[in-house]
Amino acid sequence: MDTTRGFTPGERPRVGELYWEAFGAKLSRAFRDVGTGRAEVTAALVADRFLLARDGADVLGVCGFRTAGGGAVHWSWRATRSRLGRSAAFRATAVLAPLERGDVPGVLVLDGLCVAAEHRGAGTGSALLAAALDLAAARGDRAVQLSVADTNPRAEALYRRRGFTVVGRGGTGPLAGLYGFRRYLTLQHPVGGRA
């Protein structure tokens, strides 16, 4: 298995499929139907804000991250409106805005880690976390940070096993029914340690 930064235009559909599989439940309410949501997410992926785990030409998993330019999925009002129309773009923006993470100075903020179902438990997630720590070190960051919903105990267990510790907690409040989770943890791993 190799991990690299970025994906090719030909890999975009696979990356979109993995991202939607992992996060579609909380993103789907932003769109009129699943097909529209999947297409919008796939179109909004920013190739150079992803780490990919590959076995040859097969994409096993992906890990998005934020840069000063934004997140792994870039929602542009103009592009979304041109594809969906004004009212649907407004709905998507209103539903997705509360999920947006901000930058943290000196910290590489991850924006979604997804592993294909058939490759879970085989080290793909760990390889992506190690690649994220390497990227953070190369950027001169002091830590890698991510968030995990209370509905994903398997991911939380992976992060804790790999040395991530809780640095914050939050909740979705009255929007819990919209997103499908009530609480989340924010975890960090210092650069210099191995995931």
Image (cartoon, grey):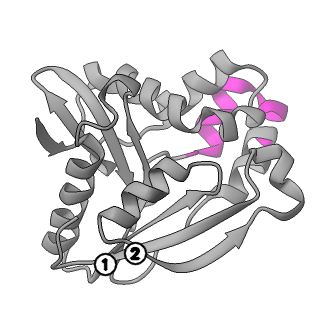
Q: Which residue is mark 1?
A: 143
Of 28 and 182, the residue lying toward us: 182
Q: Secondary structure at mark 2?
A: strand
Residue flagged by tag 2: what amino acid is it? Gln
Of the residues under marks 2 and 1, which one precedes in the sequence? 1
Q: Pointer 2: residues within 10 angstroms few (<14), some, or many (20+)? A: many
Q: Residue at x 70, y 48 (%)?
A: 96
Residue 178 on image: x %, y %: 82, 45
Q: Is residue 54 above or below residue 155?
A: above
Disc 2 to disc 1, how far (Cα)? 6 Å
For residue 17, side relative to residue 54 (left or right): right
Q: Position of residue 68 (x, y in %)?
A: 39, 68
Closer mark to the observer between disc 2 and disc 1: 2
Magenta stretch contains residue 76: yes
Disc 2: which residue: 188
Q: Are marks 2 and 1 in contact (CB under 8 Å)?
A: yes
Task: Work out whether 73 lies above or below 14.
Answer: below
Residues in magenta? 75-90
Vertical order, 176 against 90 (above or below): below
Is residue 8 found inside the magenta-colored segment of the image?
A: no
Image coordinates of residue 14 in percent, x first then y, are 36, 22
